[in-house]
Image (cartoon, grey):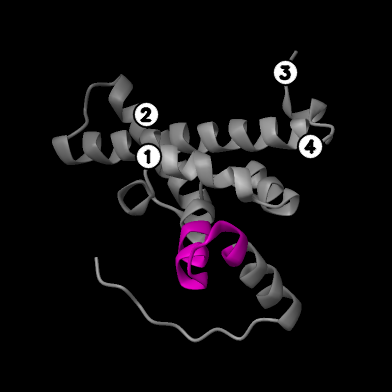
Amino acid sequence: MTDRIITLSIPETLYERIQEEAVGTKQPIESLMIDRLAVLFNRVDEALDVNKALDALEAFKDYELWAIVSRRLSAADAERLHELNSEEKRDVLTAEEQLELDQLLAQVNRDMLLRSKALLLLKERGHDISTYVIA
């Protein structure tokens, strides 16, 4: 995978929060932003190690944790997952399709772990998560 360079104009207050977080975690701003973006927008083949991603959530602000809780598969990925699951039940998946299904399921499982950890952290910080928990 090649890295892409982008120029991004962000509000001063956001930059200050990012800079403060980078100083507090003793890492370069660029590394902090890449880690955070990877957690928010990852794909299985491009993702941080799941343990690193889970650990990174500890430093997230509450609004960032709520973003993790709200994240779902894209509509296209959810539809494809449904199609592949249906085909798997009929035993008609090719090896390539099985790999694609495995990757989508790994993403779902990874996202579930991240959502669960985000909800735990939010609960520990005093937020009401009752609408997300089945009793």
Magenta-colored stretch includes residue 30: yes
Q: Nearer the viewer, residue 113 or 30?
A: 30
Q: Nearer the viewer, mark 2 or mark 4?
A: 4
Would you identify the image quadrant in which residue 21 lies? bottom right
Q: Where residue 86 appears, x then y in whole percent?
A: 37, 28
In this rendering, the label closer to the viewer, 4 or 1: 4
Which residue is pictured at 43% across the width and 43% down the height? 52
Give the percent coordinates (x, y) of residue 85: 37, 29
Find the residue positioned furthest to the left.
95
The three-letter code of the residue at mark 4 reads: Arg
Residue topped by disc 4: 125
Name the element at disc 2.
Answer: helix
If you read the primary sequence from the N terminus, does the residue marked by circle 2 or circle 4 appear first? Answer: 2
Give the Cα distance between marks 1 and 2: 10 Å
Question: Which-is-in-front pick, marks 1 and 2?
Answer: 1
Dot 4 or dot 3, earlier in sequence: 4
Numbered range of the magenta stretch: 22-36
Q: Residues within 10 Å of mark 1 (few under 14, many from 20)?
A: many
Which image quarter holds the C terminus? top right
Taking depth in this image into account, of 85 and 55 the one nearest to the observer is 55
User: What amino acid is at disc 2?
Assistant: Asn
1 versus 16 height, above or below:
above
N-terminal of the pair, mark 1 or mark 3, is 1
Where is residue 98? Give x, y as percent.
23, 33
Cβ atoms at labels 1 and 3 below 8 Å apart: no
Going by the image, does 97 lie left or right of 134? left
Precedes in sequence: disc 1 or disc 2: 2
Say the numbered circle drawn on residue 85. Answer: 2
How packed is label 2: few (under 14 Cα within 10 Å), some, or many (20 or more)? some
Give the residue number, with chain letter if any, for mark 1. Answer: 104
Residue 115: which quarter of the image?
Answer: top right
Q: In the image, what residue type sits under mark 3?
A: Ile
